[in-house]
Amino acid sequence: MRMYDVIEKKREGFALTEAEINFLIEGYTKKMIPDYQMSALLMAIYFQGMSTDESAALTMAMVRSGHIVDLSSIKGIKVDKHSSGGVGDTTTIILAPLVASLGVSVAKMSGRGLGHTGGTLDKLEAINGFHVELSTEKFVELVNKNHLAVIGQSENLAPADKLLYSLRDVTATVNSIPLISSSIMSKKIASGADAIVLDVKTGAGAFMKTKEEAKNLAETMVAIGNTVGKKTVAILSSMEQPLGNAIGNALEVQEAINTLKGQGPKDLTELSLELASHMVVLAKKANTIKEAKERLHENLHNGKAIEKFQAFIKAQGGDDRVIHDPSKLPQAKYIIPIYAEKSGYISKLVADEIGKAAMMLGAGRQTKESVIDLAVGIILHKKLGEYVQKGDSLYTIYANTPSIDLVKKKMKQSIEVSNVQMADQLIIETIE
Ligand code: URA
Ligand code: CA
């Protein structure tokens, strides 16, 4: 087989065979195919696309390029969740203990990543002592005992995806639906998931800005999952405005704790219940979404969800007093309330711009080497469509420096108060 022929075939719009896809992923991982040829192929895929069978073959070839986590010693169906990313998205920290409280086994691999705030791991590390450096044996033991444990992402998880992503990043080929889909799905499948729930975001704060693109991405990932025997469901949800009220690491942990006690923001609670109920049904712990949602809602209010979170924190070395005592989380030095300059409805609350403001405070990583400030961030007091009175508190900045003029300026550009009452539909569609 020659790489030249594979490139030419894709350039002309023909579907590649599984053998050809295996050849190019193995060849590239072993450095037998040079970057310039792979770049040409990626650009051909960018323009010609891939069929479901091709995307599924690409996904599985990337899964096989590294270590595949074996969760077979954990009882039951392991369901993983993935979010296509957003601003202030704390759902993983809520979902994991919430579904575990109904007996779903959550064996979660989590990463740090770049972005407006840290990843799930960074957020959890805002809890003093909490760590994810577990041996595989300990990890499995904790999941079997508590139904929940989180471990850091293995270095050798789908290495072909890492190599390809770096190349896509510098050849303007990141934004291709089959390439994004197989990249995301390969990591979930290599992490040992039996079934997958995807939260695909659309809107200002999302990777996919339009509903059509997001739907296409969701449908492609669901088709890949179902082709390779991993039942997959996707929820299309809005990331026009940040999710919940808190954007920042410790602030989001506090928000997750409130939500697990049944006192969370309405949108965050609603999306968490929606995603969680699909996880519960896929794990066969409830027969219908309606039944799952009712029982999950109950556990948010009867203490079972927060108890599960507490047991999880304790089992991984964390100070579980945070459950009752927010002062145990990292605290910002300066807490600055900002007031509305006029009355009206919140008609713009631009998620990605607010994310950037949080990043300017130090809540996120610009590069892999950046150090995150876990204490800082923003808490919104009003969301899209809500009425604000001149002089009402609009949001609060949590900073570790008194000079926040640029952050305030960024926020001012991101929030609009007018006489237009906007409605933001949070859950747009379920794709299965
Ligand atoms: N996230 C991923 O994991 N992969 C992509 O290709 C894009 C976003
Ligand atoms: Ca939030």
Image (tube, helix red, strand yellow):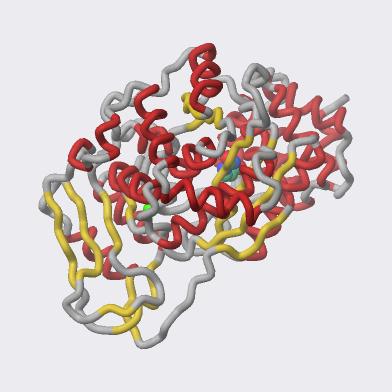
**Apparent side of residue 344 relative to residue 299 in the rendered image (left or right):** left
Q: Is residue 66 visible?
A: no
Q: Residue at x 20, y 74 (%)?
A: 392
- Viewer-closest of 197 and 419: 197
Q: Quadrant of ligand 1?
A: top right
> In this picture, is 198 found above or below 317?
below
Can residue 38 be seen by looking at this rendering?
yes
Residue 40 falls in which quadrant of the image?
top right
Which residue shows up at 13% across the image and 48% down it? 401
Residue 332 percent coordinates (x, y): 17, 45
Residue 260, x across and y down, in percent = 40, 46
Q: Position of residue 204 (x, y in %)?
A: 48, 63
Against 155, residue 375 (above or below) is: below
- Residue 134 in the figure: left or right of residue 432: left
Quadrant housing the N terminus: top right
Residue under the image location 33 percent in, 52 percent down: 247
How many numbered callouts?
Answer: 0
What x and y, as percent, mark residue 83?
Answer: 54, 46
Quick check: 392 left or right of 276? left
As rendered, which of 13 and 402 lies closer to the eye?
Answer: 402
Q: Extreme bottom residue here?
A: 419
Q: Nearer the viewer, residue 388 or 216?
A: 388
The quadrant holding residue 18 is: top right
Q: Quadrant of residue 6?
A: top right
Residue located 43% across and 38% down the image: 120
Q: Is residue 1 left or right of residue 199?
A: right
